[in-house]
Amino acid sequence: MRIRTQLILAAFVLAVIPLAAIVTYSYLSSRSALESAYRREADRLNRQMDRRLASIRADIDQRLSVVSSLPLPSDGNPDIGGNIVTVMGDAASLVDSLEFQPIRVDVRHPADPADSHPVAAAELAESPDGDENPEEPAETPQVAVAGAAPAAPPAPQPPGPMVFDLPPTVNVPRFVMSEEHKELIDEISRLGKALSKQDLDPEERADLLKEMRESQEELRGVIDASRKQFEQEMHQALRAKHEEQVALARARRTRNEQRGNGPAAVVAPVPAPAAVPATQASSTPRPAPAVRQPEMRIRKVTTQDVEKGLATAKRTSLILGRRFEAPVRKEGEVVGQLTARISNEQVIRRILGSATEDSNEVPFALDREGTIYTRNDKERALLERLGVPQKLRHGKSLRDIEGWIVTSSTDSQSGLRIGVARPVGENLDELRNAAARNFSLGLGLIAFALIGIVPLTNHLTRDVKLVTEGAERIAHGDLMTRLPVKTKNELGQLARAFNRMAEDLSHQQQRLLEQERARKEQELQQRLMSVEYERKSVELEDARRFQLSMLPKEVPHHERYDVAVYTRTATEVGGDYYDFHLEGDVLSVTIGDATGHGAKAGTMVTIVKTLFSAYHGATGPASFLHDAADKIKRMELGRMAMALSVGRIEPRSLTLSSAGMPPVLLHRAAAAMVEEVALHATPLGTLGNAYDDRTVALEPGDTILFLTDGFPELMNDAGLQLGYCAALDAFATAAQAPTAAAVIEALAASAADWHGEAAPNDDVTFVVVRMA
């Protein structure tokens, strides 16, 4: 493919690929941001519905506790219905009725021992659905126990079972309990629990009953005052609504008359409530007759109430998670239980919200039985078509619904799944269309740019052709080729660089010839050196084998002595030497260290080996060293020398003489301590030939260590020597081994721990003799 075509294709590809990447990234990032925003909004609405559910539960509980603190209808309170409606407030729209079930107590005479613990003759009536609330069980009735104290007054008798049918609510101002209401309710609850104690004396019970009556009267008075104020506000709200309807009717009639349609039909407005006289509102306890308070009907429990309660209580448990009950006390005794029959349709409507809040979102709820709740049938059909209920029932993910964002949460108390579905398909289609338009526009711009690239590539390829032809001539050996320089741009610079390259190649060719001759001469010298190195290696190997042949092939075997040796050289030919001579019960041991390494050290080892081969046990170690020093001096070996120790071991003694060797270490088995046997003298081959013998006593189990200076002078990675003190400690530890070979292994391990596995910096040799 010609370079011009390559340039055009490269320009096209390099433009299209970034364009496609930018458009794709823009689409994906915008889609991700849009989905994230919609998901956050759906989560927010979901949390809002969760808060509504919790608020409904708390509001019903609070209102029910206030109603349970009000006096019973049998207490002569004519305003009980109005007070209950007032106290229930907004919660009244969520409650169809309140059911009261009494507890009747039969108090017997305390003189009869069998009746010392009176029991309830009638317990709290069982709820219609038989469902007990595990989280908030009904409070157990407390009954006074007769004892030694005087008999308590008869237990209060409540009215029979009854139902409070709450009236439909109207759009009026909300009744809010004040702090005074809450304090009185708490005080009544406290007094009721105090009166339920069985160990109260009559005087304390009378005081508590008095406080209870006063608190109840005060609460009733506060509720009556609040109810009257509530009726005033409701009257004003109804009047305002009436005036609003009248104004709307007049405006509609005026518009019709202006259009020439004739008089419009008159819409009868809501009758305006009569004004409440100020004196009557403030002085009389009854509400003004001009304001019709929604009336509450009080009746007895019927069979239909029980049947209806079964379905209502079960549905309430599925939606709100429990039943709503509160104990009713009179004079401190639990006389009954108040149960709220919840309007589940109103609860669901309150949780999901109004259909006008956001037409794009579809709120829903799903109970534990799989029943789906929506605001209307249309939204239910839409969710069924999307498969949301089926996914929730089977525990599947809601993130794979194309074109929709669906979020849900589970109420921990009822298990109700609350969620929101929001469509995003139309917005994603708009994003895809915008991305396609941007990509098409980018391709058009690229095609337009290609028209201008063609003549530019022709101009560039003409100069490149000249460079190509010149390179071909140089490739054929014409190093005198030069290119014409016509421009000052990069191609002109390339032509000048090409000319310099051709000139440099001409000079480089000459240098290469000279370097080739020098390389061949160097290879010849390296081959000669390699031959010489191989010859020296063979000689060193022969010297190493010869030196090893100087050492004993095996250690002496004797029933009184356990002998083991260890040696490791620093180079191919080491300078350490050891040898043995056994005559009867006398074991002679020698160990030496020649100066330096290599062939010279091997020569000195050979000389000493020859001299020691003539040694016999009758000769003392010092005499042998004196004779050997004289003979080595007569050989005139120059600066060659050798340190040597000779020890003659008998069953109960060690005679030792040393020529510049490290101390011999003796481990006493009985005392578990190490002794140093040190003799100061010059090595063989140096000045001086005076050597002394030293004899030490030996006991069974004692261990003798002959060593060279390579062990205490071992270097670690930090360049520090092991030292003689550390060497002595290492032998003291190793000497506890059971055999001489085990002692050698322990010493070798200590050397490896200090120096490592590399070759030592000096030859290391051990000879260990364990006395039997």
Image: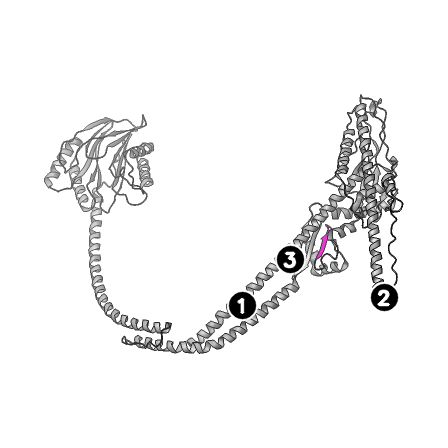
Q: Is residue 152 above or below residue 749?
A: above
The 10 Å Cα crowd at callout 2, few under 14, some 14 to 19, many 20 or more, is few
On the image, the x and y values in percent for residue 40 come to 64, 54
Evaluate whether residue 41 shows in this view. Answer: yes
Which sits in the foreground, 704 or 586? 704
Which sits in the foreground, 15 or 217? 217
First to last magenta residue range: 358-369
Residue 743 lies in what quarter of the image? top left
Asked whether 366 falls inside the magenta stretch, the response is: yes
Q: Which residue is mark 3?
A: 38
Q: Which residue is mark 2?
A: 257
What residue is shown at x 60% (from left), y 67% (from top)? 434
The mark closer to the camera, 1 or 2, is 2
Q: Amino acid at mark 2?
A: Glu
> Residue 450: which numbered mark, if any?
none
Total marks in image:
3
Find numbered disc 3 in the image and state the secondary structure of the residue it sits on.
helix
Residue 281 lies in what quarter of the image? top right
Query: Quick one: quadrant of the N terminus?
Result: bottom left
Q: Is residue 687 above or below residue 600?
A: above
Q: CA distance from mark 3 to mark 1?
A: 27 Å
Instruction: Decide if residue 664 is on the left or right side of residue 624.
Output: right
Find numbered disc 1 in the image and state the secondary structure of the residue it sits on.
helix
Instruction: Decide if residue 737 is on the left or right side of residue 452.
Output: left
Q: Which residue is mark 1?
A: 20
What residue is shown at x 42% (from left), y 75% (from top)? 3
